[in-house]
Amino acid sequence: MTYPDTLDYLYSRLPMFTRIGDAAYKKDLHNTIILLDALGNPHHSFKSIHIAGTNGKGSTSHMLAAIFHECGFKTGLYTSPHLYDFRERIKVSGIEMLYMCPEDFVVEFTESIKPVIEEIEPSFFEVTVAMAFEWFARQKVDIAIIETGLGGRLDSTNVITPELSIITNIGWDHMNILGDTLEKIAFEKAGIIKENVPVVIGETLPETLPVFSLKAGDCNATLYLAEKEWDILTVHSTVEHLNIDLMHNPTGDHLTIKCDLPGLYQQFNIRTVLSALEVLKQKGWKLPDTEVLKALNNVKNITGLGGRWQVLQSNPYVVLDVAHNEAGIKVLLKQISTLKKEGFVQNIHMVIGMVKDKDVSKVLKLLPGSFTYYFTQAQLPRALPFAELREMAYKEGLTGKGFQHPQEALSEAKNTAASKDLIIVCGSVFVVAEINPG
């Protein structure tokens, strides 16, 4: 098979959650275990860090990967979904940065595992997890940063025994699969906590802390709360950077960080990362502050991360952000409000599309009537048709035009916006993925 043939096989032969939703979700680890066993259990040959959470797990994963790379470790990074290239999911340190796995490997791996695929009919995600673990083993990585796909307890990645588990936060998302209360969602995410493996929790709520405490106690896993470990003293965000001052509570040490991920919400991910680094240092990992600070200022260059307050142009500013649920949209709106108050931007134009299985009404209720909207949809079965989204928005007092394709919506926004305005593309990672960054 050629590489395009291979991708066509993977996309068409295997159930893919990003395209069809719940029907692709496998509620056990059975297939993953079979696939990995057929490969000789490659996940046993490298150390790892496991990251779950409702929001922020992707950014946290990329920050940690950038830091380990900058500190001289050969680093693997597994994340999902991808934006532009399937191979974004599987990256390994090269000379200057983390590089996507080669096309030849994707072809060769798929052909070699095809008999098992035909026999057990795994999901797309189950196969990509096995693919990532095989590549990390072949590359002999020192450490692999592994982001969960959905949940934690039954997620395909939950076959590893990591150096550290991290849960960024808990919010309302995928309730139809993970549960209809914050406690139930927290229980699923807490499933990545392992026996005698420390765990860092980025943010807690009164409903979620007891869940984490109980699970950590049952597993004899030392529990660290990032909120207790580091105090955020000052935060200043521009369109291009985030500047943050923090104090390490156990020592009283201060740290000033300039991060190239300017979203205000990154302050909490940075705090989580710093808490994780302290635990890892205790385990013997050499992660000097000089390299840590350099890495956080170059996360995008080192890892290729996109879609997290990604600035495509100025005059007017065009920004891509994968905020897609209630919590994510709240912090996105706070970011926009801050930029308006400080005079960086004037009027706001929002290109927005969502998927059917999100709580769309909760998101729409948060959006201001003063924005100009361009309703659109990604080209996949899960996408909420733009006409339905526009109708729902009208009921919340939001008005705007509808567009079949995200790129058409963005073109109209660019034609309408003044030079000091801000155009933000959000609502679904798949809408962001269909915007041409060039």
Image: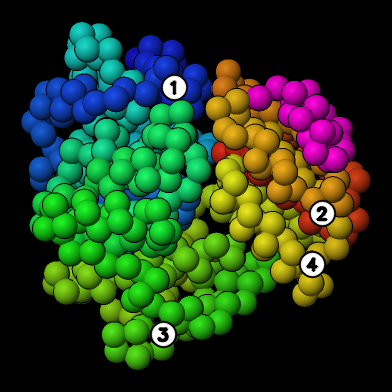
For mark 2, what is the residue?
348
Q: Residue furthest bottom?
A: 252
Q: Tag on residue 102? A: none
- Alpha-carbon distance for marks 4 and 2? 9 Å
For mark 4, what is the residue?
340
Left or right, residue 220 beside residue 168 = left
Q: Residue at x 44, y 68 (%)?
A: 270
Q: Earlier in the sequence, mark 2 or mark 1?
A: 1
For mark 3, what is the residue?
247
Amino acid found under the numbered disc labelled 1: Asp
Left or right, residue 397 beside residue 433 = right
**Where does residue 288 sit, x and y in percent of width and height?**
28, 79
- Alpha-carbon distance for marks 3 and 1? 42 Å
Label 4 secondary element: helix
- Determine whether label 1 and label 4 are within 8 Å by CB: no
- Determine whether label 4 and label 2 are within 8 Å by CB: yes
Residues shaded magenta: 384-404
For mark 1, what is the residue?
22
- Determine whether label 2 and label 1 are within 8 Å by CB: no
Q: Is residue 392 visible?
A: yes
Label 2 secondary element: strand
